[in-house]
Amino acid sequence: TVINLLALEPDFLVIRQGEPLELSLPYETSTVLINGGDGINEHPTQALLDCFTLLEHFQAVDLVKKHILIVGDIAHSRVAHSNIKLMARLGARVTLLAPRCFRPNHNIGQGYEITVFSELLSDVDAVMCLRVQKERFSSETEFDAHEFAEAYGLSRARLNALGPSCVVLHPGPMNIGVEIDADVATDARSLINEQVRNGVAIRAALMEFYDRSRQ
């Protein structure tokens, strides 16, 4: 399929699929291949726009001295995997909050992992909630949305406890009432709409970057 698409000689080919894509093409191509999200592996452009949103909010050039909390289904989240790596590369201290079954099986840049909100030792500058991806669970995995919301859902009380200046991110789509409450998603501290808006600019900039590099 990819070879047929490349025969059209597009400048860019954005590929979004269920599993990591490894191409062994029979010829050289000038087409730029962009990962639009692959399974539970990576989502690079989402991490770029998320980190840009934070840099824009903090009016900074890096995330040094920033403490970022990522909450939810981290094991199945390509967004989390790319964000942890990029946030750590930008100097942030990344904490993961999830039940053990939702944690990554190795360290990819997170500072430390906790099981409950009360284990946080300091205020947080930004919290990212992740969608619980039930479609990626094995048939043996049991999930209770009510129990998850009780233990890990971001309510206004929990947001306030994270610190007075903590901002909220969510890559979407949201399970309102599960990983995030409706009033938190629309709170003045929510950057979710900015994430959506910045996604267009970041992906356009990525294409322009590669287009210029070929000139």
Image: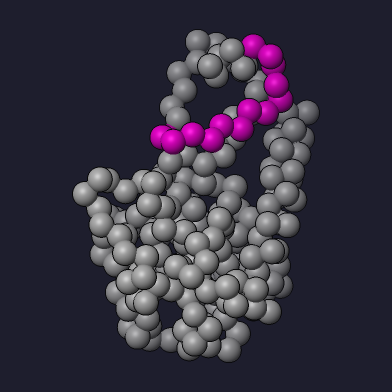
| Closest to the observer, 24 or 73 | 73
Q: Residue 210: which quarter of the image?
A: top right
Q: Is residue 54 visible?
A: yes
Q: Is residue 160 above or below residue 10?
A: below
Say which residue appears at 68% left-offset and 52% top-offset.
199
Q: Is residue 89 visible?
A: no
Say which residue appears at 62% left-offset and 16% top-offset.
6
User: Is residue 16 highlighted in magenta?
Assistant: yes
Q: Is residue 18 left or right of residue 113?
A: right
Q: Is residue 133 left or right of residue 53?
A: left
Q: Is residue 155 above or below residue 146?
A: below
Range drawn in magenta: 7-20
Q: In the rendered picture of this protein, how many numbered marks are placed on residues? A: 0
| Closest to the observer, 141 or 108 | 141
| Closest to the observer, 67 or 153 | 153
**Color scheme of the displayed model:** one colour
Q: Residue 12 at what x, y percent from top left? A: 67, 28
Q: Residue 176 at what x, y percent from top left? A: 52, 66
Look at the image and tell me in which quarter the C terminus lies.
top right
Say which residue appears at 57% left-offset and 67% top-offset.
169
User: Is residue 94 highlighted in magenta?
Assistant: no
Q: Residue 41 at what x, y percent from top left? A: 41, 44
Q: Please identify the residue farthest to the left as the structure is shown.
A: 140
Q: Residue 133 at what x, y percent from top left? A: 41, 53
Say which residue appears at 73% left-offset and 28% top-offset.
214
Q: Residue 189: which quarter of the image?
A: bottom right
